[in-house]
Image (cartoon, helix red, strand yellow):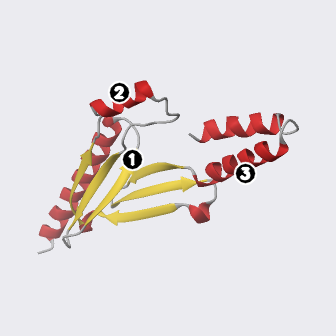
């Protein structure tokens, strides 16, 4: 998505002298979208899972770490296309990805849950869930040994 706005930005800068007011406005909007768009990243370590949304500037990026000891279970929900979405995409062209976002639901030991939207292949997400479940089991086994 960021690449689309970069292409629009370059095109508007190139044609700025044709209509400075219009292209100036579009340049401003493109810059705003470039700055606020980001990439969702999931990092699984031996002790925790970290969900990051990285943006160009670190001070507007978000990150949430959850230790395996705090996780009861994790679930990956893959959303597919609905028939209505496919029909609307054929009738009205919408730039970008119109597919609903996939997401993780992490159920915590305290009864709450955390949801995180994500992108990527099903295989990558299944691997992440597998690693987290292995980490949860490892933490539970260590906890039982110390009893």
Outermost residue toward the top in this view:
90
Q: Could you say which quadrant of the image residue 5 lies in? A: top right
| Res 81 visible | no
Pointer 3 or 2: first along the chain: 3
Tag in front: 2 or 1: 2
Query: What secondary structure is found at the residue carrying circle 2?
Result: helix
Pointer 2 or 1: first along the chain: 2
Structural crowding at the residue carrying mark 1, measured as other residues with C-alpha within 10 Å and reported as few (<14), some (14–19) or many (≥20)? many
Q: Position of residue 101 (x, y in %)?
A: 37, 44
Pointer 1 or 3: first along the chain: 3
Residue located beneath label 2 in the image? 87
Q: Is residue 45 left or right of residue 95?
A: left
Residue located beneath label 1 in the image? 118
Q: Which mark is residue 28?
A: 3
| Number of marks present in the image shown | 3
Residue drawn at 69 percent across, 34 percent down: 7
Q: Position of residue 91 (x, y in %)?
A: 43, 26
Contact, mark 2 vs mark 1 (Cβ under 8 Å): no
Q: Quadrant of the N terminus?
A: top right
Q: Could you say which quadrant of the image residue 142 lies in? A: bottom left
Query: Marks 1 and 3, how far apart in space?
Result: 28 Å
Query: Marks 2 and 1, how far apart in space?
Result: 24 Å
Residue drawn at 32 percent across, 49 percent down: 103
Structural crowding at the residue carrying mark 2, measured as other residues with C-alpha within 10 Å and reported as few (<14), some (14–19) or many (≥20)? few
Q: Which mark is residue 7?
A: none
Residue drawn at 84 percent across, 44 percent down: 20
Q: Could you say which quadrant of the image residue 6 lies in? A: top right
Residue drawn at 60 percent across, 61 percent down: 58
Q: Quadrant of the C terminus?
A: bottom left
Query: Marks 3 and 2, how far apart in space?
Result: 33 Å
Contact, mark 3 vs mark 2 (Cβ under 8 Å): no
| Res 38 visible | yes
């Amino acid at each position: 998505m960021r690449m689309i706005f970069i292409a629009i930005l370059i095109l508007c800068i190139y044609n700025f002298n044709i209509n400075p007011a219009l292209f100036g406005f579009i340049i401003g909007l493109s810059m705003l979208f470039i700055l606020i768009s980001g990439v969702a990243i999931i990092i699984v370590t031996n002790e925790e899972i970290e969900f990051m949304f990285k943006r160009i500037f670190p001070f507007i990026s978000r990150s949430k770490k959850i230790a395996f000891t705090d996780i009861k279970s994790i679930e990956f929900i893959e959303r597919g296309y609905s028939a209505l979405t496919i029909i609307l995409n054929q009738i009205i062209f919408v730039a970008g990805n119109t597919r609903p976002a996939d997401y993780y639901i992490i159920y915590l030991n305290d009864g709450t849950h955390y949801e995180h939207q994500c992108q990527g292949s099903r295989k990558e997400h299944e691997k992440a869930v597998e690693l987290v479940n292995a980490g949860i089991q490892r933490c539970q086994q260590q906890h039982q040994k110390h009893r």
